[in-house]
Image (tube, grey):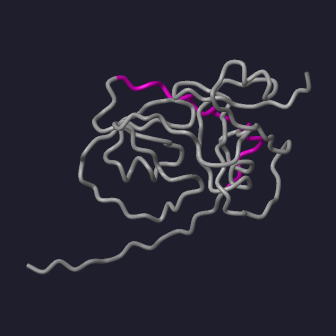
Amino acid sequence: MEYSPVFAYDGNEVRTYGNECEACKVEDSYYLARSCPAGKIKCVPTGAPVCGVTASGTLVDFTDECSACTSDFEISSYFRGQCPKKLDTSISYCPPFPRNFAVMCTMIYKPVCGVDVDGNKRTLGNSCLACTTGDIVYYTEGACEEETVVKPLPVVKLPIEKPIPIELPIERPILVKQVV
């Protein structure tokens, strides 16, 4: 009856069980859940891959625990090792986070349908652009049949108390001779 959560993944969804005993009754395999510390932490990257689980249940590969727990993807739990992959040959997975965004991509248009950490789909110009876009986890060849709406960022309006006067220098006109 001890609570020590584990994850099971069937290729479509992540299921969480209270402990290994509970998971063994239903699943063939499962992963021991680990928790990130509350809040942002300072840590030293180890290079041992982990699979982070987002709030929406998407599995995201990271190079190590440090990268997962300090990412902006709100990873609260993870397990050691790479994320299990669907055995769907039409899916291509991007490299783990953090990524090298200094990669130069060609601008040849060969559209792919990228899926981000929240499960949203959007069409991108090519596979290189998909994997250098911040939060794309995997893609399929061709444009998305139906794109999902990405959650918009909240707009923050700050009140301006007093306008700040700005003095601009007065410029002198430049004389130009016209040659005929």
- Residue 119 painted magenta: no
Asked whether 121 or 1 is in front, the reply is 1
Stretch in magenta: 146-165
Q: Position of residue 4 (x, y in %)?
A: 85, 31
- Residue 150 painted magenta: yes
Asked whether 161 or 6 is in front, the reply is 6
Q: Which quadrant of the structure image shows residue 31?
A: top right
Q: Position of residue 140 (x, y in %)?
A: 35, 37
Residue that appears at 52% across and 25% down: 12
Find the residue positioned furthest to the top. 26
Q: Is residue 157 left or right of residue 134?
A: right
Number of marks drawn? 0
Residue that appears at 30% across and 39% down: 141
Find the residue positioned furthest to the left. 180
Location of the C terminus by quadrant is bottom left
Q: Position of residue 137 (x, y in %)?
A: 50, 42
Residue 29, placed above or below residue 137? above
Q: Which quadrant of the structure image shows residue 33?
A: top right
Q: Is residue 105 left or right of residue 67?
A: left
Mainly helix, strand or loop, the magenta region? loop
Find the residue positioned furthest to the right. 2
Q: Position of residue 81 (x, y in %)?
A: 64, 49
Q: Which quadrant of the structure image shows residue 110?
A: top left
Residue that appears at 28% across and 55% down: 107
Residue that appears at 54% across and 58% down: 99
Q: Is residue 90 left or right of residue 80?
A: left
Location of the N terminus by quadrant is top right
Residue 164, placed above or below residue 34? below
